[in-house]
Image: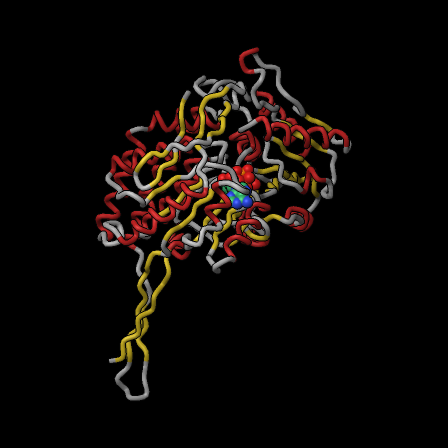
C-alpha cells in the first residue's frame, strides 16, 4: 500500500498513526497517510524557524530566485507523476490536471520569483527644520514562519499559490494539505530536495483540522502568519487561532458566485463559459457559478443550450481522453451535494437535468459521482440560492432589467467572483463596478493573470493575494529614516 509521509526538515517522516485515503473513482483504498501529531508539527515549525537562520536566511535574492525556478522546472520534469498523483487523489480528468493544476503549480514559483526580483519599495525625501532633510526608504523583510492550510479542490495549484510567494519573499513554510488530497504536497518535498532548497524551508504535516495537524499548526506560537484557503466556517476558527499572539491571516474562503447573462451577449460564448464555470472540476471551484441570472428574452433558449451541454459531459476515469467530468472528491462530499439535490426537489425546483447519481459501469459504481444538475423555479431566499453547494449544479433564474440583476446577484453573504455576459461595453463596466465581489469577469471566466489582485469581499475572504499583493502579506516593510 502506498504510504504518504510527512516532510520535515528535508526528510520524509512516518508516524505511528495513519489514516486511509480512498479513491473518489471507486472508493477503493489507495494510500495510507501518516498523521502528524503535536510532536511532528512542533518539529516542522522548529525546522522552519531554524531554516530562517540558516543558509536560506542569508541567501542572496538572486540565488533564491534561481532555486524557485529550479523548483518549477522540477515540477515540470516530473509532470506526469504530479498529474497522476493529483488525479488519484481527486478523480479529476487528466486533461484538467495537465492543463490547469500542474502547470499552474509550476508557474506559481516562476511568477513570484520574477515579481520579487523586480518590485521596488518606497522612498521619501523629508524636509526637516534645520534644512538638512532626511531620507526615508522601506525594506521588505520576510514575515518568518508561514503556516499554509490548504483545501482539496485544486491541491497543488492552491498550495503553491501560497508557497511560491512565501518562499520568494524569503519565508519558510509549514504546509497542512487537505487530508483528502495529501499526495502532491509530499511529492513536492522530493522536488525541493532535488532542486537544492535547504532543509526546513518547506515542510508538510498531514492530518485533519480540529484536534489534529491543522489545529496544532495554527495554534503553534512559533508560527508568524497563517494563510488559509477553505470554507468560511473554518476561516473563522483559524482567525480565532491567529488572534492568540496577534498574527496576520490571509483568508480565501467560500463563494456563491453569480453569472449575469444579458440578452445582447454572444450567446454561444455565454453558454460555453457558463458550462465551464458551473461544471468544470465537477463544480468544485471556489470561483464557480452556482447562480445564473438570465435576461428573460433568452431564458428558454439559454436553459435548453445549457441542458444540452451538461448532458453531453461524459463521466469516466481521468486517463480516458473522452472524460469531461470526474467524480466529486469524496463520498462525504457526494452525500453533501446529494442532500442539496434532494432539498431542491423538496422545495419544488424544476429539475432541468440531473438531480441524482449517474448510471455507471460496475467498476465505478461505488465512486463519488453525481450528475451535473440544472434547476429553475426556485426563489432567491431558498438554501439552493444562498448556500455554497460546491458541486456541479446551477440554479437559473430570469431577470427583467439591469438593476434588478445587480441587486439580486449581490444579495448574498459571499463576494468572491461573478461573470457578466454582454456585448454592451458601457453596461459591462457599469455592472462590473457595482458587483460586491473581489473579482468580476466580463465575457470570460477563470481568466487569470497571476499579477492581479485575487481575493473575496464579504464572507469570501480577508486580504488579497496575487502579484504585489502577495508581497504585502508575505513580507513586512521596515522603514529606515536617515537624518542628513
Ligand atoms: P475546509 O475548510 O473544510 O478545509 C480546508 C483545510 O482546513 C483542510 O486542510 C482542513 O484539514 C483544514 N482545517 C479544517 N478545520 C480546521 C481547523 N479548525 N483548524 C485548522 N485547520 C483546519 O475546506 P475544503 O472543504 O477543503 O475546501 C472547500 C472550500 O474551500 C469551499 O468552501 C471553497 O469555496 C473554498 N475555496 C476557496 C477558494 C478561494 O480562493 N476563495 C479556493 C478554493 C476553495
Residue 460 place in picture, x, y as percent: 56, 48
Q: Residue at x 32, y 84 (%)?
A: 128
Residue 315 place in picture, x, y as percent: 54, 19
Asked if residue 241 is positioned above or below residue 87 in the image, the reply reads: below
**Any part of residue 444 in sight:** no
Q: Residue at x 66, y 41 (%)?
A: 387
Front one among 77 and 30: 30
Tell me the quarter of the picture where residue 256 sits: top right
Residue furthest to the bottom in view is 130
- Relative horizontal placement of residue 275, taking residue 164 as reference (left or right): right
Quadrant of the frame with the C terminus: bottom left
Tell me the quarter of the picture where residue 10 sits: top left
Residue 122 place in picture, x, y as percent: 33, 66
Front one among 337 and 132: 337
What's the image's color scheme?
A: secondary structure
- Relative horizontal placement of residue 397, taking residue 67 as reference (left or right): right
Asked if residue 305 is positioned above or below residue 230 in the image, the reply reads: above
Quadrant of the frame with the N terminus: top left
- Relative horizontal placement of residue 118, taking residue 34 as reference (left or right): left
Asked if residue 183 is positioned above or below residue 124 in the image, the reply reads: above
Residue furthest to the top in view is 362
**Any part of residue 294 in sight:** yes
Residue 448 place in picture, x, y as percent: 44, 42
Q: Residue at x 36, y 63 (%)?
A: 477
Front one among 203 and 130: 203
In the rendered picture of this protein, how many numbered marks are placed on residues?
0
Asked if residue 316 is positioned above or below residue 71 in the image, the reply reads: above
Amino acid at each position: 500500500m502506498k504510504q504518504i509521509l510527512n516532510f520535515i526538515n528535508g526528510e520524509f517522516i512516518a508516524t505511528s498513526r495513519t489514516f486511509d485515503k480512498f479513491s473518489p473513482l471507486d472508493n477503493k483504498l489507495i494510500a495510507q497517510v501518516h498523521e502528524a501529531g503535536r510532536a511532528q508539527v512542533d518539529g516542522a515549525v522548529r525546522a522552519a524557524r531554524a531554516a530562517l537562520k540558516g543558509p536560506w536566511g542569508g541567501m542572496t535574492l538572486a540565488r533564491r530566485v534561481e532555486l524557485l525556478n529550479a523548483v518549477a522546472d522540477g515540477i515540470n520534469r516530473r509532470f506526469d507523476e504530479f498529474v497522476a498523483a493529483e488525479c488519484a487523489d481527486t478523480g479529476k480528468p487528466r486533461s484538467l490536471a495537465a492543463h490547469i493544476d500542474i502547470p499552474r503549480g509550476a508557474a506559481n514559483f516562476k511568477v513570484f520569483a520574477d515579481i520579487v526580483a523586480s518590485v521596488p519599495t518606497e522612498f521619501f525625501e523629508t524636509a526637516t527644520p534645520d534644512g538638512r532633510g532626511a531620507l526615508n526608504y522601506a525594506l521588505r523583510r520576510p514575515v518568518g514562519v508561514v503556516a499554509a492550510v490548504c483545501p482539496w479542490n485544486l491541491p497543488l495549484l492552491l498550495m503553491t499559490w501560497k508557497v511560491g510567494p512565501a518562499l520568494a519573499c524569503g519565508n519558510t513554510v509549514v504546509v497542512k494539505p487537505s487530508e483528502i488530497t495529501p499526495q502532491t504536497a509530499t511529492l513536492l518535498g522530493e522536488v525541493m530536495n532535488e532542486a537544492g532548497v535547504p532543509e526546513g524551508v518547506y515542510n508538510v504535516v498531514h492530518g485533519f483540522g480540529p484536534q489534529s495537524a491543522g489545529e496544532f499548526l495554527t495554534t503553534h506560537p512559533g508560527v508568524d502568519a497563517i494563510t488559509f484557503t477553505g470554507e468560511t466556517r473554518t476561516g473563522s476558527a483559524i482567525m480565532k487561532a491567529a488572534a492568540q499572539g496577534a498574527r496576520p491571516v490571509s483568508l480565501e474562503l467560500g463563494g456563491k458566485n453569480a453569472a449575469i447573462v444579458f440578452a445582447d451577449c454572444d450567446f454561444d460564448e455565454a453558454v460555453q463559459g457558463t458550462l465551464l464555470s458551473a461544471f468544470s472540476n465537477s463544480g468544485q471551484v471556489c470561483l464557480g457559478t452556482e447562480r445564473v441570472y438570465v435576461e428573460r428574452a433568452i431564458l428558454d433558449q439559454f436553459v435548453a443550450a445549457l441542458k444540452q451541454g451538461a448532458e453531453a459531459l461524459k463521466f469516466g476515469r481521468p486517463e480516458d481522453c473522452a472524460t469531461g467530468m470526474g467524480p466529486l472528491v469524496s463520498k462525504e462530499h457526494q452525500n453533501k451535494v446529494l442532500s442539496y439535490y434532494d432539498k431542491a426537489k423538496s422545495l419544488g425546483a424544476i429539475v432541468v437535468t440531473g438531480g441524482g447519481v449517474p448510471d455507471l459501469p460496475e467498476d465505478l459504481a461505488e465512486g463519488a459521482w453525481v450528475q451535473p444538475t440544472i434547476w429553475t423555479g426556485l426563489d432567491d431566499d431558498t438554501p439552493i440560492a444562498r448556500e455554497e453547494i460546491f458541486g456541479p449544479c446551477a440554479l437559473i433564474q430570469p431577470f427583467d432589467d439591469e438593476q434588478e440583476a445587480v441587486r439580486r446577484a449581490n444579495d448574498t453573504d459571499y463576494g468572491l467572483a461573478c461573470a457578466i455576459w454582454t456585448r454592451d461595453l458601457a453596461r459591462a463596466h457599469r455592472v462590473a463596478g457595482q458587483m460586491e465581489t473581489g473579482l468580476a469577469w466580463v465575457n470570460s471566466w477563470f481568466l487569470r493573470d497571476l499579477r492581479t489582485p485575487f481575493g473575496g469581499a464579504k464572507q469570501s475572504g480577508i486580504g488579497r493575494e496575487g502579484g504585489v499583493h502577495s508581497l504585502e502579506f508575505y513580507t513586512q516593510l521596515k522603514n529606515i529614516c536617515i537624518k542628513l
